[in-house]
Amino acid sequence: MKKTIIVTGGSNGIGQSIVEELAKNNYNIILNYNKSEGKAKKIQEELKKIGYEIEIYKADVSKREEVKKLVEYAIEKYKKIDVLINNAGISQTKLFTDITDEDWNEMINTNLNSVFYTTQEVVKNMIHNKEGCIINISSIWGIVGASCEVHYSVSKAGIDAMTKSLAKELGLSNIRVNSIAPGIIKTNMIKNLSEEEIEEIKKEIPLQKIGKPENIAQCIKWLIEDEYTTGQVISINGGWVV
Ligand code: NAP
């Protein structure tokens, strides 16, 4: 039976690559998007042209009610959710002293509370089925901390703590929970970096290059197919953080 997968923030960058990789591997995919409706529809159309069907669903994952509707839609359509990929996220670069309450709350709501909402809604179905796989996209900055990205780093460290704790709590129900903590990956999220800044960063990375969204998507595919990895933070970063 085909596995059903929800990918949050599947309309751009890493999420788009995850959707494209998994759609070609015979899974039922629900691509969640929030602002990028046109982009989500285009991904759906392009995949259809080459023979792959996916569903798209608009929900702001920082809002519990919208997450509830997303999960209800998925269960009504496919009965069972096998895999949840918590990829949606935002970033912001600011001095700690300039971060406002609004900045802080938006970051934590979008990057961390969203993972609490989606996971809690989906996991009820997974516990009932006695199987499941949850993959959270965190960041190297949650591991080592980033200057001028304190709120972002806190949100990602929180995700990794949730991953480890939940892996322990849900192992008995045969649900695996893991994080992927990317280094620097070429997407819109790094568009504020100049070419010169990227060249400087590359020099610090042992593999001397920044990552591609496909590097993350391939690890996701492996984690879905695996059966004995849980509670891990897998950092894909070219050796930048070891
Ligand atoms: P991106 O190209 O900016 O894409 C972010 C995605 O998140 C978009 O599809 C966006 O959807 C979605 N999103 C944001 N807020 C949302 C919300 N409230 N509800 C639903 N979807 C929402 O960035 P990316 O680089 O692919 O980032 C994906 C994940 O990887 C993020 O969690 C990010 O923190 C993490 N990451 C990225 C890097 C990197 O270097 N790129 C490094 C480490 C970790 P809409 O446009 O439809 O709103």
Image (cartoon, grey):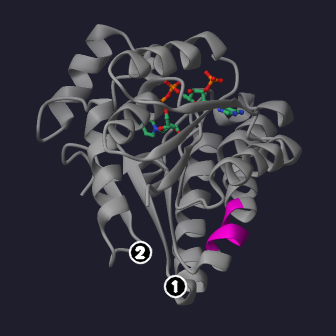
Q: Which of marks 1 and 2 is nearer the N terminus?
A: 1
Where does the image place residue 8, in percent across and percent down from the top left?
Answer: 59, 40
Q: Is residue 222 left or right of residue 190?
A: left
- Amino acid at dot 2: Thr
Residue 101, compared with residue 132, is above or below; it is above
What's the distance in space between the residues labelled 1 and 2, CA to CA?
8 Å
Q: Is mark 1 on a helix, strand or loop?
A: helix
Q: Is residue 182 left or right of residue 198?
A: right
Quadrant of res 116? bottom right
User: Residue at the left extreme?
Assistant: 207
The quadrant where ligand 1 appears is top right
User: Residue at the bottom extreme?
Assistant: 172
Give the labeled residue for mark 2.
Answer: 230
Where does the image place residue 201, in percent across and percent down from the top left?
Answer: 26, 27
The stretch drawn in magenta includes residue 130: no
Start and end of the magenta stretch?
Answer: 122-126
Kindly identify the residue that appears in the image at 58 percent across and 77 percent down. Answer: 165
Kindly identify the residue that appears in the image at 48 percent across and 42 percent down. Answer: 146
In the foreground, 158 or 20: 20
Q: How crowded is mark 2: few (under 14 residues within 10 Å), some or many (20 or more)?
A: many
Q: Is residue 25 left or right of residue 139?
A: left
Q: Is residue 101 left or right of residue 23?
A: right
Are dots 1 and 2 in contact, CB under 8 Å?
A: yes
In the foreground, 34 or 232: 34
Instruction: Tell me the quadrant of the picture where the C terminus can be found.
Output: bottom left
- Amino acid at dot 1: Gly
Give the labeled residue for mark 1.
Answer: 171
Residue 126, compared with residue 17, is above or below; it is below
Q: Which label belongs to residue 106?
A: none
Q: What element carries label 2?
A: loop
Residue 40, compared with residue 146, is above or below; it is above
